[in-house]
Amino acid sequence: MHFGGFLATVLYIHNSPDSQAGAIWLIWGWIDIPWSALYFMAGSDYSIWLGNVSSRSVVLAYVFYLPHVIHGVIGTIWWYFVPALAARVTKLVRGKTG
């Protein structure tokens, strides 16, 4: 579901005539907490690196665009494992109280 929502967002931004369409990543920032903190950690070094990559390959620049990395890859993996993590924590809590 997460990856499908991510793809729908990318398609929406890509096909939208609205110049503010990219602001939808702000919603994804809440969906993918705690990984959204990577935006702040990446800083200007990532932007410089991405600029160098984009001068060589537009496709790679699109792939390594930070919202695509955080929400498309890391966020999808995160939400794949969250149910198992929640089940494990629930089992531990019930084991200690029971």
Image (cartoon, rainbow, N blue to C red):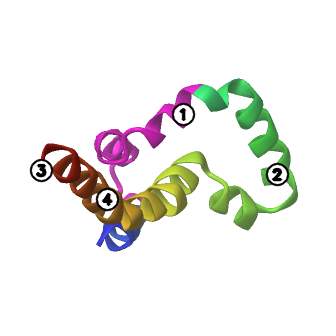
Q: Earlier in the sequence, mark 1 or mark 2?
A: 1
Q: Nearer the viewer, mark 1 or mark 2?
A: 1
Q: Residues within 10 Å of mark 4 (few under 14, many from 20)?
A: few
Which residue occupies 29% across, 51% down?
89
Q: Please tell me the numbered disc located at residue 88.
A: 4
Q: Nearer the viewer, mark 4 or mark 2?
A: 4
- Range of residues picked out in magenta: 12-40
Q: Secondary structure at mark 4?
A: helix
Residue 17 location, x and y as percent?
35, 56
What is the C-alpha distance between the residues marked 1 and 2?
A: 18 Å
Is disc 1 in contact with disc 3, using a CB cutoff of under 8 Å? no
Quick one: 53 or 21, which is closer to the camera?
A: 53
Query: How many marks on residues?
Result: 4
What is the C-alpha distance between the residues marked 4 and 2?
A: 41 Å
Amino acid marked by disc 2: Val
Which residue occupies 77% across, 29% down?
45
